Image (tube, rainbow, N blue to C red):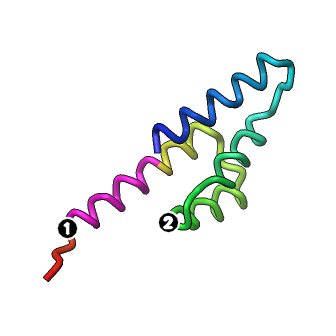
Amino acid sequence: MKEYLAKIKILCDTLTAAGNVGSEQEQISIILAGLLVEFESIQIVASAMKVPLDLLAEMLADCETRQQELLSNVSFQ
């Protein structure tokens, strides 16, 4: 997730440097549009509540951590 968010930030910074200044909400929309289905609940909440970018990044990182923990606890018998 950190890599994905970093790529979006680089893209937005590049657009800003080229004179296309986008809002934080536009950056959030780009992030949400590219998420996998595993993050659908966060997409819904963030879209409905207009979550700030820093909180969205935290929510996504937390969700990814929980998913990884769940997967590591699953035993394949």
Name the quarter where the C terminus is drawn: bottom left
Residue range in magenta is 61-73
Q: Would you name the residue on which mark 1 appears?
A: 73
Instruction: Assign a secondary structure to mark 1.
Output: helix
Q: Is residue 60 left or right of residue 75?
A: right
Which of the 4 image quarters holds residue 41? bottom right
Circles 2 and 1 in contact, beta carbons < 8 Å: no
Q: Is residue 24 left or right of residue 46?
A: right
Q: Residue at x 47, y 37 (%)?
A: 3
Determine if the magenta segment contains residue 20: no
Q: Is residue 25 left or right of residue 52?
A: right
Q: Residue at x 50, y 66 (%)?
A: 38
Determine if the magenta segment contains residue 66: yes
**In the depicted structure, whether residue 35 falls above or below residue 54:** below
> Residue 18 location in percent, x, y?
82, 18
Q: Residue furthest right?
A: 19
Instruction: Assign a secondary structure to mark 2.
Output: helix
Q: Residue at x 73, y 48 (%)?
A: 29
C-alpha separation, residue under disc 2 versus residue under disc 1: 18 Å
> Residue 31 location in percent, x, y?
64, 47
Q: Would you name the residue on which mark 2 appears?
A: 38
Which of the 4 image quarters holds residue 40? bottom right
Disc 2 residue type (three-letter): Glu
Disc 1 residue type (three-letter): Asn
